[in-house]
Image: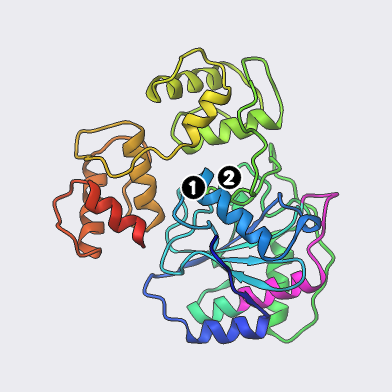
Amino acid sequence: MRSFKRYSIQEFKRYLRGVQVRRRIDHIQIHHTWRPRKSDYQGERTIQGMYHYHTQTRGWQDIAQHFTVSPDGYIWDGRSLELNPAGIAGHNQGGLMFEMIGNFDEGEERLEGDQLHAVAHAVAACQERFGLNDDRIVFHREYSAKTCPGTSISKRWFIEQVRRVRGGGQLSSRQTRVKPASAQPSSGGEEVRSSTSSWNGQILRRGDRGELVRDLQRMLAEQGYQPGPIDGIYGPQTEAAVRRAQRELNIAVDGIAGPQTYRALTAASWRGEILRRGDWGRKVRDLQRMLAERGYRPGPIDGIYGPQTEAAVRRAQQDLNIAVDGIAGPQTYRALTAR
């Protein structure tokens, strides 16, 4: 199991001053885990749990976030700063991702004390290091129906805490409730989920409702199957999306999501098989996601190997110093997964 380094805020600032980053960083993403909660925190074991979920279940090459802020006021390292985060679908390029351990939805846990001190100082330090203004701080919910980083945290209040840190002032733990229309309690990751998922293969069918259905819908949407609104209602659009997924994944097509559908959706598909312009399907979608996470701009994650995907493959091949032909095969796969 991979190990992770823990920093105090002073150690983190020294680290930032010395680190060299070739990738352009143009915004800072703020997330909460939702699960695990602050009360679940067990030091490095919790970070490793997230890493295991992201790499083994989601099939990503690393933990989604660059930094995790723990309840005891420490900052844990994570994904290489040379890689885009896996935090906000379609908006990861140029991002620097912070994940705060806890459920900061209204009535749950609070962002306060050592944890608030750490995240405010860390974000301020990153702003200084990468030359970013306050308008480059991004909340997950700005680009998603999720509540992340929690309905008890208003963006205005959060930015005010960062400003106070920069000005040498005192922090305030008083938080302002915010709940966008149709917001959904959820973790930060699209890269950025907890070490366990609510839906892990339980039988779901048309007419069902609730958080398990939302998890299924998110999973379908992330993979391009268009389930309609992420509203927790297993209606005709969700059923049609399940059927599309089942058909493409070569499993029984019945519109009912169960263990077989879950295993097929969560299994990594592309492992270096030859893909070229004109191909389509889940393997192409996996390739596109891999390219997008690494900043190579493949265009829509739609499972179609068109000119944008081919151009992204060429950019990756050139950057990775391998043969440039626009065809993704074993050599391209190995080079992409080695970074």
Q: Position of residue 187 (x, y in %)?
A: 65, 48
The type of residue carrying mark 2 is Ser
The type of residue carrying mark 1 is Ala
- Asked if the magenta segment contains residue 308, the reply would be no
Q: Image quadrant for the C terminus?
A: bottom left
Is 68 drawn above or below residue 326 in the view shown? below
**Mark carried by residue 239:** none
Q: Residue at x 62, y 77 (%)?
A: 124
Q: Position of residue 325 (x, y in %)?
A: 13, 51
**Mark carried by residue 89:** 1
Is 68 drawn above or below residue 249 in the view shown? below
User: Marks 1/2: CA distance?
Assistant: 8 Å
Q: Is residue 165 left or right of residue 306?
A: right
Is 168 drawn above or below residue 198 in the view shown? below
Q: Residue at x 57, y 48 (%)?
A: 53
**Tag 1–tag 2 contact (CB < 8 Å):** yes
Q: Residue at x 73, y 87 (%)?
A: 168
- Asked if the magenta segment contains residue 111, the reply would be yes
- Which residue position holds label 2? 144
Highlighted range, magenta: 105-124
Q: Position of residue 335 (x, y in %)?
A: 28, 58
